[in-house]
Amino acid sequence: MSNEESVSPSSVYTGIAQQLETALASIPSGTLAVRFFHVMSSNLTYMVARKGALQSMVISNLSGEIDDLDAYAANFGRITEVFKSVVGGAVDTLSAAQVEHLTVLLTNVHLLFMLFLLHDRTEGNKAAFELLAFARDAFTLLRPVLMIPPGAKALARLSQILVSAMAW
């Protein structure tokens, strides 16, 4: 058994949270898209190197067999705080409500990247990094939509849906 396989799911998530916090410390000033891309590109590189352990963590989570639910919840909170800082420090963030809604969205996008990474069979996980570049570009294109009331309402609705699904 390799060292990666013997790592507990909660310690994998602890490492992901620590890595995101490290990436946040060197985040550039800029738009939401630029800041999200910075922390996520670093985090994707980290997760690629631990893909087997990440797979074990996701399977444990989906099967309800999390080894330490308190640690998992604490790390989810740490990750959420990283994305709150990413959003809150962006030069294009508009309101406190949007900071909260975008934090929820980005935290869930991070989870989606974990799942995508597990399915990525491209050499060097190239598709995951291409998807991240696409997400950066999409955030850039969609950001002005959130400045108009229908866009802001749609974001709030999506945030509510995501929060209800993640209720502990």
Image: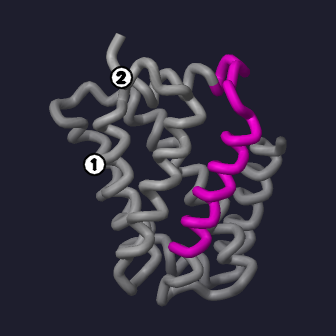
Farthest residue, direction top: 1
Where in the figure is residue 50, as x and y percent of width and height? 35, 33
Where in the figure is residue 39, as x and y percent of width and height? 40, 63
Q: What distance separates the C-alpha of mark 2 from that of mark 1? A: 26 Å
Relative to 139, does residue 2 appear above or below in the rendering?
A: above
At x 60%, y 50%, the residue is 108
The answer to whether 20 appears left or right of 150 in the picture is left
Q: Which mark is residue 129?
A: 1
The answer to whether 133 appears left or right of 27 in the picture is left
Where in the figure is residue 95, as x and y percent of width and height? 69, 86
At x 54%, y 26%, the residue is 8
Q: Nearer the viewer, residue 96 or 85?
A: 85
Can residue 56 be seen here? The reply is: yes
Start-end of magenta stretch: 61-86
Three-letter code, disc 2: Asn
Q: Nearer the viewer, residue 58 or 154?
A: 58
Viewer-nearest of discs 2 and 1: 2
Three-letter code, disc 1: Phe
Residue that label 2 marks: 3
Query: Does label 2 or label 1 sit earlier along the sequence?
Result: 2
The answer to whether 163 appears left or right of 155 in the picture is right
